[in-house]
Image: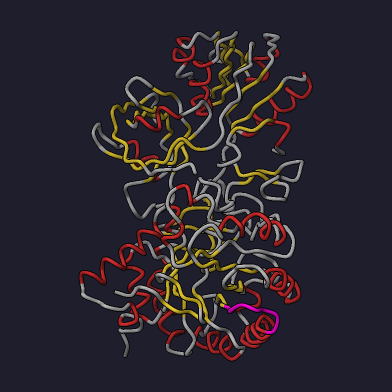
Amino acid sequence: MARKVKYTAKVSEISWITEDVFSLWLENKDAAAEAMPGQFAELYCNDKSRLLPRPISICDVDEENGRIRFCIRAVGAGTNEFSALKVGDTVKMVAPLGNGFKYKDCKNALIVGGGVGIFPLLLLTKKLTGKKTVVLGYRTEPFFVDEFKNAGAEVLIATDDGSVGTKGTVIDCIKENSLTADSIFACGPMPMLRGLKAFGEEKEINTQLSLEERMACGLGACLGCVVKTPDIDGHSYVNNKRVCKDGPVFEASQVII
Amino acid sequence: MNTSVNIAGVEWKNPVTTSSGTFGSGEEYSDFFDLSELGAVTTKGVARVAWPGNDTPRVCETPSGMMNAIGLQNPGVDVFKERDLPFLSKFDTKIIVNVCGHTIEEYEEVVEKLNDTNADMFEINISCPNVQSGGMAFGQDRDMVEIITQSMKKRSKKPIIMKLSPNVGDIADMARAAEAGGADAISLVNTFLAMKIDINRRKFALANRTGGLSGPAIRPIAVRMVYDAAHAVKIPVIGMGGIQTSEDALEFIMAGATAVSVGTATFSNPLAARDVAVGIKNFMVKNKVEDIKELIGCVSQ
């Protein structure tokens, strides 16, 4: 029987990436050794009036030093609490959770991220060994681009206002550059994921999407975070799957979004 | 030292169970601890067929609490019987199956299908605030509480726990109605009907518009209601509502609950129910309490 543990993880590094997005490295050898691209962690607030853990995607892993990196937008009370952590502070964590990207057989990957959805794609980009093209979409100012370049990917950018790269969406960018692939891996806002699902279907490219939903337990028990599915699911026996336990990464064809 | 409690002839090794809907059928949490450490496991609501539940978002956080409107999604009694019950049976703990339905006939069908299994007790959900029919609609009408309790007693070969809604004017009256209908025990409180609005999106935080509020925010109200109910009936009361620690649980026990249930706290701490059981035992050792029964309802008047 698999054993899960609520770890106490120490903050080893914390810094701001943009004015509201920060990078947090937490130390935990066991979780770091196990973590796969596309999986997530539940981080528990130290303020006990905030009951629910925050599901945060794993951005990167430092296996040598047993650390996991999270890049988080400070939007609410919980993420603001995490943003104020100092080196040496501790956070309770359950990780890794969920099913990540299936990437082992991929030879030509198209990796597409939008906004803070780019972060769960970094570890994947590092792990991919074949050709890898990354398309990053932003409202205006790009961030975190060098991290993807350093992972050996060709990086293209789309911005809503055209200040950098293609003016428009990531899909405009893909079309403008006539990009092809044997697999698409994506994370970002729902309209973007819908567009990529349609694009993948049209071009007959295997497409995997990392989804987000409000969660309570994060472990598959409470059924808070479901996504509709075209087929009756083998666990729920209805037309939905749990984002936390069955996902967060799904084959696009498996979900109705 | 004795931590065991007897509820309608069923002996629990300690007075702690899990609140329906927060613990699935135990599988996910068995990764964290041995379910045999609990007096009982109470399952998520089981209906006669699979229910898809409500649209998302289904959950949101509130100050010292949370709201949910899952809508009793469940795979149906046949899958429960084939898959979940055998899993739970591997543990040395009592199994309480929470039963839900849209009509009395639907509740009856579930009970009858599980009568000849090794489930130990049935908890009848007449208090879910997130379904259109059944659930809380039954639990808010005194006569209906009595009628449905009678009908469950007639069909069931196992003890019946009626799970009461706090969204009523007089909880003592509802407790008496369940007792009059022949209930073997009552459990309370289910969640409080609530609403949260997302001012930035100008929308309800939950797709269902309303949801059930749980967590420590409701605990003092729950303690009061458990006290009122326990003083209105002779049958055992299973107390719940925002219990996070053994100290919280002991409040319910001293208010008159024979047993307690840990729900939302499991989301903050997957080990919460076990920790509560361990903490009660430690309290008894420290305070030289020989038998948990000395504490049940010890605060009165």
Asked if residue A205 lies left or right of residue A173, the reply is right
Judging depth in this view, the residue of B245 and A136 nearest the camera is B245
Quadrant in which the N terminus of chain B is drawn: bottom left
- The residue shown at (63%, 20%) is A170
Q: Split into 4 quadrants, where in the image is the C terminus of chain B?
A: bottom left
Q: Is residue B88 visible?
A: yes
Answer left or right for B207 relative to A5.
Answer: right
> Residue B81 placed where, x, y %?
67, 60
Q: What x and y, as percent, mark residue B154?
A: 69, 84
Question: Which of B18 and B176 lies nearest the eye of the viewer?
Answer: B18
| Magenta residue span | B154-160
Say whether residue B87 is left or right of residue A67: right
**Where A120 falls versus B270 (above or below)?**
above
Front residue (pair B92, B72) = B92
**Residue B157 lies in the magenta-colored region:** yes
Which quadrant would residue B254 be assigned to in this image?
bottom left
Q: Position of residue B208 (x, y in %)?
A: 63, 58
* Residue B35 painted magenta: no
- For image coordinates 49% across by 44% down, the residue present is A1
Residue B155's place in the image compared with A47, above or below, is below
Q: Nearer the viewer, residue B254 or B285?
A: B285
Residue B268 visible to the viewer: no
Q: Is residue A155 above or below residue A7?
A: above
Give the number of callouts: 0
Q: Position of residue B153 (x, y in %)?
A: 65, 83
